[in-house]
Amino acid sequence: MLNQKDILATLDMIHKQHLDIRTITMGISLLDCCDENLDACCAKIYRKITTRAKDLVKTGEEIEKEFGIPIVNKRISVTPISLVAAACKADSYVEIARTLDAAAKTCGVNFIGGFSALVQKGCTDSDWKLIRSIPQAMAATERVCASVNVGSTKAGINMDAVAEMGRILKQTAALTAHDDGLGCAKVVVFANAVEDNPFMAGAFHGVGEPECVLNVGVSGPGVVYHALQGVKGQPFDLVAETIKKTAFQVTRMGQLVGMEASRRLGVPFGIVDLSLAPTPAVGDSVARILEEMGLEVCGTHGTTAALALLNDAVKKGGVMASNHVGGLSGAFIPVSEDEGMIAAAESGVLCLDKLEAMTCVCSVGLDMIAVPGDTSAATISAIIADEAAIGMVNSKTTAVRIIPAPGKQVGDRVEMGGLLGSAPVMPVHQSASADFIARGGRIPAPLQSLKN
């Protein structure tokens, strides 16, 4: 039960420490929108989304005013389009992407996710159509986000899809070159993707989800950073306990908002995703949390251990606060969206190899990384394969959101604006991986997949 002290502490977090609801995301099943005729399918999709989500933004704004809690984004996720469009007799799904974009604009949401394919074990004809539609779809839309799941602990890694995604990202960057390859910021390549993730660009409405559901994403790096300032020089046991207590408070707030929005919208409440998702604002950085633990610069030796502690403590605190913690729930390390990560990358301390090591113990993976525009498709595919292997072997979600910025070289900066921030262009290894990627086929699932 809330008391006056809890309420005042939460208000202090909101006003001084960047605590917010990062997103309320409505998941909508589009399985009943299948149709052989592409135009009919698009009409069904538009009607279903605009009917179900017509009050989402208004409800979010009302809760913001009444509760005094900022809700930064209102979003929609839908059934992976490669499943919905499989019956369509069309060579491309770009028109469906345009329909999703139009529906998102009508509803007033910031992003819509689910232009997606799940291909961890192999690709259907519909999956290939969707994947090959991604470059043009990202260039033709503003609010549509795409994702492709190329691996899992149960299935292994689909290296044919991995190879294709390297080429797809290069094409996407080329088609959005006028925006420094911004289209790639809306594309995520996953291993072990989850069905209830409310965060973009990887959100989609899984086939195991209800007809319609409301998921909440909470973020509070600034709150954790502030809490750790009170335990300077103390043992790690106390650091972990402090993070757990803070995560508990943040999750409680997220559940309160989620259940209230669910009640008003008349849809089931799904999960609270307690992810420390940073922003470019000073004081809202995961990197600064790690440095507060005693690291001079994020990326130096000890960073992976500090991140492991942070991620674990966040999950433990969240689970104690709610029976419905889900999504990814942990710490995100997107370079462009975190002012501390940007500074560490520009100093040369934080490099791609260290980021890869850090992804072994955090919630996602190589997120919002800018690399030189002349980076080959095979090298991008090899980076994806490395991340997918980490996810596959460790039974965790990993992902790659990488931007081969056209015309940019190491030391340049890619400006994306808003929550996407800006990214310093980071170096990649120059030794080739082309022959490795050219093998194709499937990397088999690891031994730990045999759990039955």
Image (cartoon, rainbow, N blue to C red):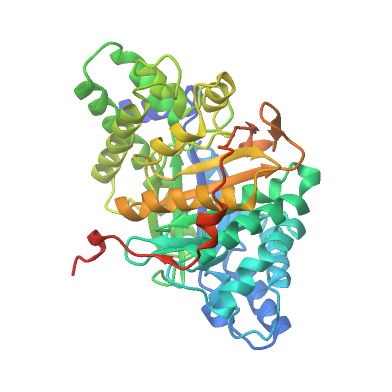
> Where residue 15 appears, x then y in whole percent?
50, 25
Q: Nearer the viewer, residue 385 or 137?
A: 385
Q: Residue furthest right?
A: 178
Q: In this view, does 414 lie to the left or right of 81?
A: right
Eyeballing the image, is 9 above or below 116?
A: above
Eyeballing the image, is 113 above or below 52?
A: above
Q: Which of 284 and 412 is in front in this view?
A: 412
Q: Quadrant of residue 11?
A: top left
Eyeballing the image, is 138 above or below 49?
A: above
Confirm whether residue 246 shows in the render. Answer: no
> Where residue 285 appears, x then y in whole percent?
49, 27
In this rendering, the count of numbered labels is: 0
> Where residue 51 appears, x then y in whole percent?
61, 70
Q: In this view, does 277 lie to the left or right of 163?
A: left
Q: Which residue lies furthest to the bottom in this view?
A: 36
Q: In which quarter of the image is the N terminus?
A: top left
- Residue, x 70% and y 42% (percent of image)? 373
Eyeballing the image, is 136 above or below 60?
A: below
> Where residue 110 appears, x then y in whole percent?
64, 50
